[in-house]
Amino acid sequence: MSALSRTLSVILLALLCQIAAAQDLPTRFDPQRDAARDVMTAQALAKASGKRVLVDIGGEWCRWCRMLDRLIASQPTIKAFVDGHYVWVKVSYSPENKNAALLSRWPKARGYPYLVVFDGDGRMLHAQGVQGLEIEMEREADEDYDPVPVMAFFKRHAIPASGAAAPVSAR
């Protein structure tokens, strides 16, 4: 086997491992998951792919969490941006599992969903609730997220084009 073939095999194996690990990350808030392991997996994937980690803390009980999922899934531009710049991992906060050991290391959530952005080395860069990302109408049934500030949030916390480190913040 030539050096080029070995190099290509190693690269292919690394990519397959990344894909397998990404597929193992939760797409829903699952209280049965090992949230600390999921976050570590997301950090490894982010480091290998040059992305940030987006930790989405909430639960299936949380209607604002479900609305954020729907907005991202229904907005191709936002979905493509998130997929291209973040490894998204969901951490359940629920009566069945509050993930207290993991969540106690981060700023206290002031509502759900609560979003925490990390770099691939595990440094927390930003933490905030979703206040300010939603549109509140007169009737509760009309409440939803505003795509403009949601996209601005994702752009603001993605890796800058220059590769410079973003400031650390928590709200």
Image (spheres, helix red, strand yellow):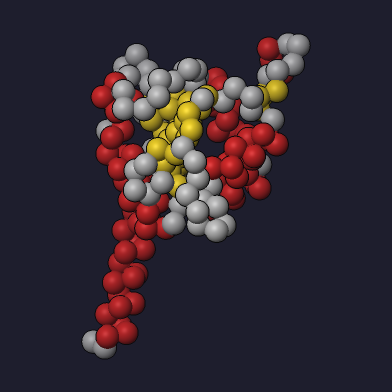
In the picture as drawn, the residue positioned furthest to the top comes out as 139
Q: Please say if 82 is above or below 127.
A: below
Rendering quarter of residue 53 = top left
In the picture as drawn, the residue positioned furthest to the left comes out as 1
- Image coordinates for residue 48, horizontal then vertical, percent: 37, 58
- Image coordinates for residue 28, horizontal then vertical, percent: 43, 32
Q: Please say if 170 is above or below 44.
A: above
**Total numbered labels:** 0
Q: Please report the residue visible at 49 percent of the width from the left and 41 percent of the height from the top.
A: 167
Front position in the image: 26 or 39? 39
Along the horizontal axis of the image, is 26 left or right of 142? left
Q: Please report the residue visible at 29 percent of the width from the left and 72 percent of the height from the top.
A: 10
- Image coordinates for residue 33, horizontal then vertical, percent: 30, 32
Q: Is residue 24 visible?
A: no
Front position in the image: 38 or 103? 103
In the picture as drawn, the residue positioned furthest to the right comes out as 138
Q: Please report the residue visible at 38 percent of the width from the left and 49 percent of the height from the top.
A: 120
- Image coordinates for residue 116, horizontal then vertical, percent: 45, 33
Front position in the image: 58 or 132? 132
Q: Please say if 161 is above or below 69.
A: below
Position of the N terminus, as image quadrant, is: bottom left
Along the horizontal axis of the image, is 131 left or right of 123? right
Q: Please report the residue visible at 46 percent of the width from the left and 52 percent of the height from the top.
A: 51
Q: Is residue 50 visible?
A: yes
In the picture as drawn, the residue positioned furthest to the bottom comes out as 2
